[in-house]
Image: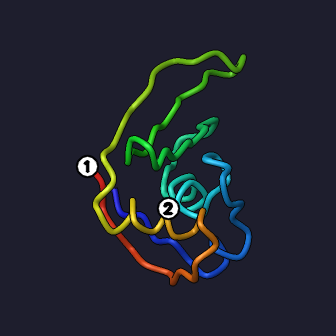
Amino acid sequence: MKINVTAEDIRAGVSGESDACPIARAALRALTEAGEYVNVSAVRAALHVQHLDATGKTRDWRCFGLPPEAAAFVDAFDAGSPVEPFTFEVS
């Protein structure tokens, strides 16, 4: 899956909020199924995707390892350092 983190994702992203960071915003956009919740964890350097059913119950989870540049982006963003838009892939 290709994740394209835009300047808008960076502007609207929330530091320290794993489900509202720029990578989570970009990943949510990249996913096509309705009702998905995306969570990014820099500690584990992973993208966690929780699939929900119509009632809000968890159907399943997927976990994708983040490449080093994405993990470094999360660390820099959370530290308040300047970051730039970029694209990466997870599979």
Up the image or down, 34 lies above or below 14; here it is above
Closest to the camera, between mark 2 and mark 1, is: 2
Residue 91, disc:
1
Which x, y percent locates residue 20? 67, 53
37 on left or right of 87: right
Mark 1 nearby-residue class (10 Å; few <14, some 14–19, many ≥20): few
Of residues 31 and 18, the one nearer the viewer is 18
Which x, y percent locates residue 4? 46, 71
Amino acid at circle 1: Ser
Amino acid at circle 2: Val
Residue holding disc 2:
74
84 on left or right of 37: left
Q: Residue at x 46, y 50 (%)?
A: 42
Q: Residue at x 44, y 44 (%)?
A: 43
* Mark 2 vs mark 1, CA separation in Å: 19 Å
Q: Disc 2 or 1, which lies upstream in sequence?
A: 2
Residue at the farthest front position:
79
Q: Residue at x 46, y 38 (%)?
A: 48
Which x, y percent locates residue 87? 39, 74
| Residue 52 lies in quadrant | top right
54 on left or right of 81: right
22 on left or right of 84: right
